[in-house]
Amino acid sequence: MPNDSPSREKLKQMLRSVGFIVVMAFLVRTGFIFYVFISAMQRMVRENIPFGYEAGAVAAAIAQGRGFSSPLRMMQTGPTVWFTPIYPYLLAGIFKLFGVYTYTSNLVIRFVDNIFSACTCWPIYAIGAKAFNKRIGLAAAWLWVVLPMSLFFSTVWVWDTALSAFAMALIVAATLQLRGSDRLRSWMGYGALWAFGAMVNPAVVSVLPALALWAIWPLRHRFATAGRLVLASSLIFAAGIMPWTVRNYVVFHKFIPFRSNFALELWLGNNPAVPDSWSPWLHPNDDPSEAAKYARMTEIPYMQEKQQEAWRFIRTHPLDTLNFTLHRFSNNWIGLDQPPAEIWNHVPLQVKLIIFGDSIFPLLSLMGVLLAYRSHNEAAGPLASVMLFFPLIFYITHSSSRYRHPIDPVMLVLAVYAVAYPVTLLLKRSSGLHARIPATNTTD
C-alpha cells in the first residue's frame, strides 16, 4: 500500500500532462494509419492515383521545377494562386525528399498531418483552461485524442485541414491569453500568428476582427496605447502576407492577398445545375470541358467569368439560392444536406450512430456557448464568434464537415463545458445537501 500512493500520484501527473496527451494522440493516429489505411495507400500508388487533389498537383509542380502552378490533375495550366503557399510548399518539400506521388511520400504526409492534429491538443487544453478551468481543458484535450473527426481528417485527407485546425486553435488560445495585455512583443507575435494562419487557410481571417477587437477592448480607454499595439500587430500581419501578395501582383498584375478560387467555389454552389447545395462534377478537376476552358482562358479571366455567372444566378434565382444556403447550413453543422428525420428510417444502424454523433456535437457546442453567457464568462464572446463567423463563407459557396474542421477544437471545448456544467451543478447541490443534514440532526 505505501508504494501504491506514489505510483498513483505519478499516474495522475502523467494523465494531466499535455505533452503526454499529445504523444498519445499521435500514437492513436499512427495506429489508425497502419491498421486502416496502409493497404488503401498502397493501392493508390499501384494504380497511380494522385493524392492531395489541387494541393497535391501544385506541390508536384513545385517539386518538379515548374513553380507554384498547375492545380488541375488533367493538364499543366501555368501559374496559380489557387492556394496560399504554406501547405503546398510543405507537400512539395516532402515530394522532393521522398518522390512525387510515391508510397513513401504518401505515408510521410499523413504522419506530418497527424503531428499537426496531435499537437492541437496543446491549444485545446489552453483554451479550456483559460476560458473555464484546467479540468475542462484536460477533458477536451483527451477527447481530441479519439474524436472521430480529428482522426479521419488528419489521416484520410491530404489537405491543409489538420494544420488549419491547429492554427485556428493557436489563434484562439493566444487571443484568450492576450486580452488586455499592453506588451508590445505579445501583440507583434499575435500579428505574426494571424499571418501564419492566413497563409495556411485564409478562411481563418473571417474571425480576425471579432477576436482582435475582443482582445484589445479592455484597453479602449488608453487610446494611445491601444492604437500603438494594434498598429504594431497590423504591420506584422501585413509584413507576413506581403511576399505572397507581391508575388501574385507580379505574376497576375492584380492585387490578390490570399487566393483566387473564391469565384469558382461560389459558382459551384450557385448555378442552374445545383441539385441541393453544390455541383462537384462541374469542378475543373472532374469536368474535362471545364478544365480545358480554364487552361484556355488562364486562371484569373476564368475566375472572373465564374464570379459573374454566380452573381447573375444569385440575383435571378433568390429562392433557389436561399434553398441551397439552407442545405449548406445543414451540411456544415451535421454533415447532411437534408434534415436527419428525412433519412433516419432508410439508413443502417451504424449510419444512424454517425448522424446522431454529428448532430449532438454542434448542439452541445451551442449549449456550451449559452451556458458560458449565462455564467457571465467573458470568453463566451470570442468562442461564440468563431462558431458564428467562420462558416459564413461556406454558407454562400459550398460546405462540408471538412471545411468546418478548423473550428472543431473550439467546439469541442464548448461541448465539454456543456456536459460538465450541469454535472458540476448537481455535485455542488448534492454536497450542500449532505452538509445540511448533520446540522439538522444536531438541532433536533
Image (cartoon, helix red, strand yellow):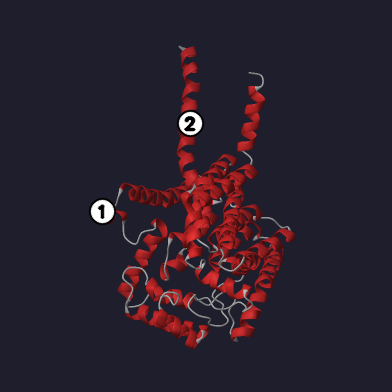
228 vs 133, nearest the viewer: 133
Name the spot of residue 377 as percent of width and height, x first. 54, 48
Q: What is the number of the mark on residue 346?
A: 1
Amino acid type at circle 2 is: Leu
Q: Residue at x 49, y 35 (%)?
A: 424
Q: Is residue 161 left or right of residue 327?
A: right
Q: Residues within 10 Å of mark 1 (few under 14, many from 20)?
A: few
Across the whole image, how many numbered discs are drawn on residues?
Answer: 2
Q: Residue at x 45, y 84 (%)?
A: 292
Give the Cα distance between marks 1 and 2.
Answer: 41 Å
**Disc 1 on helix, strand or loop?**
helix
193 vs 368, nearest the viewer: 193
Name the spot of residue 114 as percent of width and height, x first. 57, 54
Amino acid type at circle 1 is: His
Name the spot of residue 71 as percent of width and height, x first. 52, 76
199 vs 173, nearest the viewer: 199
The residue carrying mark 2 is 427
Q: Is residue 384 visible?
A: no
Pointer 1 or 2: first along the chain: 1
Q: Quadrant of residue 109?
A: bottom right
**Is there CB contact under 8 Å for labels 1 and 2?**
no
Q: Residue at x 39, y 76 (%)?
A: 282
Q: Residue furthest left?
A: 345
